[in-house]
Amino acid sequence: MIMKKTEAFFEMHRDIEVLRRRAIAEYWNDNQADDVIAQLSLRQLSHLVTIEKLGPCSLLTVMRHTGLSKSAVSAAVDKLVRLGILSRVGNPDNRREILIGVLPAVKTHLKNIDTRFRRLVNSIFTEECTGEEIDKIAEVSALIVEKLRKYDLK
């Protein structure tokens, strides 16, 4: 029964992912001639957004969230460190662990992608929804966020 009731949520999630990928692709196309983001594939950009969202994290955490193998994550991180996109720092709480983080200059690009994504979603809501529907979306979204934050998303 729960599966049927949550199907709309999962469909919405897929659609939101399509919109986020569109925002990433548009940003990449608009900026590919003149910045470091141009050197990344759309998939690498997607992984970079994931790492930025997680904050400084271990390779294991990146593996869990991207679905990549340890060797693939390690190679991808090596490349992004060489490009000046990611940093590696020791974990002060566990000296055997290295934390991966997005460098501040790159966070600006990711913020611009997020702004583009939000504009895209907001324009759809403005065109397609009444004020009452937007209020309902906001209310349900807040509830979903509240419930999901009870779990370890890292």
Image (tube, helix red, strand yellow):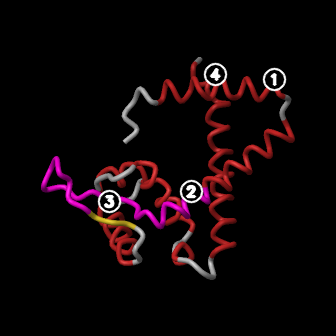
Give the magenta range. Answer: 89-113
Q: Nearer the viewer, residue 21 or 85?
A: 85
**Which mark is on residue 100?**
3
Q: Label 4 belongs to which residue?
A: 5
Q: Label 1 belongs to which residue?
A: 132
**Which mark is on residue 27?**
none
Task: Say whether residue 64 is left or right of residue 126.
Answer: left
**Which mark is on residue 111?**
2
Label 1–label 4 contact, CB within 8 A: no
Label 1 neighbour load within 10 Å: few <14, some 14-19, many 20+: few
Q: Secondary structure at mark 2?
A: helix
Label 2–label 3 contact, CB within 8 A: no
Mark closer to the chain start, 3 or 1: 3
User: Marks 4/2: CA distance?
Assistant: 34 Å
Task: Say whether residue 119 is left or right of residue 36.
Answer: right
- Residue type, mark 4 in image: Lys
Mark closer to the chain start, 1 or 2: 2
Vertical placement of residue 31 versus 4, above or below: below
- Residue type, mark 2 in image: Lys
Q: Secondary structure at mark 1?
A: helix
